[in-house]
Image (cartoon, helix red, strand yellow):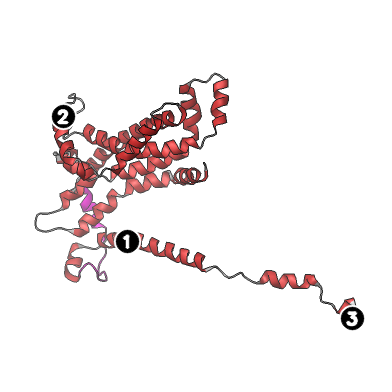
Amino acid sequence: MTTDTLPPPLQAQPAAQGRKKPRPWGQIASQLFLISASVMWLLPIAFALYVAIRPYEDTTKYGYVSLPHHLTLKNFSDAWVQSDMLHFFLNSVLITLPAVVIVLALASGVAFVLTRVNVKINVVLLIVFTAGNLLPQQVIITPLYRIFLKLPLPSFLSGSGLMYNSITGLIVINVAFQLGFCVFVLSNYMKSVPEEMYEAAMVDGASLWVRFWKLTLPLCRPALAALATLLTTWIYNDFFWAITLMSSGDKRPVTSALANLQGQFVSNQNLIAAAAMIAAVPTLIVYILLQKQFIAGLSLGSSKG
């Protein structure tokens, strides 16, 4: 047999390269799961939007789960006017922005001390801050309610002179309950910063404050942005504290403004759905603005260490 009759080995490579490798069943199952989870997550939002653009008379006659006979945006304008949405938006801003700034400032400082300052009780403090997140809010609402009724505040911080029924009280309680989670996240993130950077800074004569302000915080910017997004969503959407620790309806945040559209005997669910869609817009804007930093904070925090 001559060498001319032997099939060249290179001729079989293009055919092998043209074949598509079959997808593993695990990858297909994971994609189906993600698609199903996304549909289940978006379905209630889509249904609320569907109810919001239908007139109340249409849903009363044909039911909420029915084909629409008429669509309108009038529910959004009515919800904005009837619930005095702008006023409650400003209340939410006065509560959310200071609370987010204070939480991030305190959490970053505490996390830096716990991770970069050698103190014997560091582990104990970290456990205490973390354990605070395990306590349900409903468990301590009775003693906390009585404490708020007795704690005095200056008149420029509270019109009633107490922590109760004041925006300052809501800021304080949100800071207290969100601080532990942020300390836990930032302390783990700061541990991923190389120790050699701090040693070099100490050799250059950098003080503890310089190492915190000019070295640690810039490196933690993605984590801070991710936490800012989460905190804004959680504090802005808070309803429990605003109802239990605030008696004046005009001081409550926007989430409690939806209750103003609830009648004693009849409820216009179309109007409430439209107001809920409007109330969700600020958190959506915050996420869009901080989307890159949010994803970077999550990905960097998971890859370091």
- Cα–Cα gap, marks 3 and 1: 72 Å
| Between discs 2 and 3, the one toward the N terminus | 3
| Between discs 3 and 1, the one toward the N terminus | 3
State whether the magenta stretch is mostly helix, strand or loop: loop
- Location of mark 1 (residue): 46
Amino acid type at mark 1 = Ala
Q: Position of residue 19 (x, y in %)?
A: 65, 72
Which is more foreground, mark 2 or mark 1?
2
Residue 21 drawn above or below residue 229: below
Locate the N terminus by quadrant: bottom right
Q: Quadrant of residue 85?
A: top left
Amino acid type at mark 2 = Leu
Q: Residue sitting at 35 percent across and 40 percent down?
A: 181
Q: Residue sitting at 24 percent across and 56 percent down?
A: 273
For disc 2, the neighbor class at 10 Å (few under 14, some 14 to 19, many from 20) is: many
For disc 3, the neighbor class at 10 Å (few under 14, some 14 to 19, many from 20) is: few
